[in-house]
Image (spheres, rainbow, N blue to C red):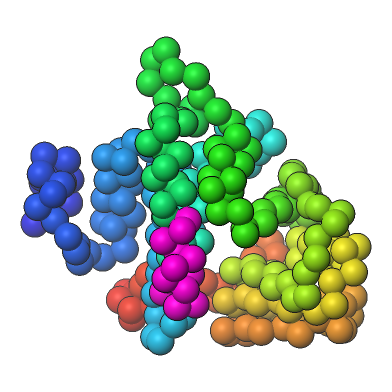
Amino acid sequence: MLVDAFAMELLRRPQAYDVVLTENLFGDILTDEASMLAGALGMLPSASLGAGTAGLYEPIHGSAPDIAGKGIANPIGAILSTALLLRWSLNQEDAAKAIERAVSHVLGAGLRTADTARDGETAVGTTGMADAIVELVPEAQVWHLGLYRDHKTLKPITYYNKMSAHAQLDVCYVVDPMLATGGSALAALDILKQWNIPQIRFLAIIAAPEGVRALQAEHPDVPIYLAALDRELNEHSYIVPGLGDAGDRQFGTAPE
């Protein structure tokens, strides 16, 4: 079936479909469209599952630096992605269900962020929605540190920091899909070490040797775990050959 015909069918009869097998580009189109059935892109989590318990979890939307710091992003997709991680990679079904119940309860109570609020409804911000969900999972603790790389200067920019000065943590995992120059990772590690956390570990899917050397030079006490070490950075400080199309690389469907 062609993607345009299936897109129409998906909206017309969503209950008729459980699993859809498609190539990566069509999958991206259909997941964005299907998100409207739930109300907005910010509502849905996603999981890219590998062998065993390996997985990559994220909301179906991408990053949105243009709205960073405005407090209007919908956090539900990110929160539900954590539930998927707990279920499929950490075998913590009870914890996953606790998060999903909390989200359902908050939505059932009528709380909405700006992307899902109807005309006349009062929207809550990112923090308001997240706090309401966390209150229903009292054992959970949430902090947030947001960094991105300026593509012109290649310097890390901290756009959000809601870290607690009273955190009681034994181990902290810093997860970065791609370690290129290492600037953002170094900035995150510098901030985390201000907490005096006993153990910090760094995980990435792929990395460039330049980024690995930078981390080892500045933070030799932090172990680095990589799925793959690529060849180098190019003149734009992008990893070569890089992650490319993640779906095609995972399933071997990239054109020769």
Relative height, residue 174 to residue 4 (above, below): below
Q: Is residue 119 left or right of residue 99?
A: left
| Quadrant showing the C terminus | bottom left
Q: Position of residue 37 (x, y in %)?
A: 26, 40
Magenta stretch mostly in which secondary structure?
helix
Determine the image quadrant of residue 80: bottom left
Please say if 221 is above or below 248: below
- Residue drawn at x 31%, y 41% is 38
Q: Position of residue 62 (x, y in %)?
A: 50, 50
**123 or 160, which is in the foreground?**
123
Front-lying residue, 38 or 91: 91
Of 241 and 110, nearer the camera is 110
Indicate whether residue 221 is drawn in magenta. no
Q: Quadrant of the N terminus?
A: bottom left
Question: Does residue 85 show up?
Answer: no
The picture places residue 165, in percent across and down from the top left corner, at 87, 54
Name the quadrant containing residue 137: bottom right
Q: Residue at x 28, y 58 (%)?
A: 27
Asked whether 11 or 229 is in front, the reply is 11
> Residue 179, relative to residue 224: is it above or below?
above
Identify the image quadrant of residue 9: top left
Residues rendered magenta in the picture: 86-99
**Rendered position, 183 above or below 173:** above
**Residue name at image x 51 percent, y 24 percent:** 123
* Horizontal side, residue 195 vs residue 102: left or right: right
Q: Position of residue 90 (x, y in %)?
A: 49, 77
The residue depicted at 59 percent of the width and 69 percent of the height is 177
Judge whether residue 31 can be spotted in this image.
yes
Left or right placement of residue 39 versus residue 75 in this view:
left
Magenta stretch containing residue 87, yes or no?
yes
Q: How many numbered discs?
A: 0
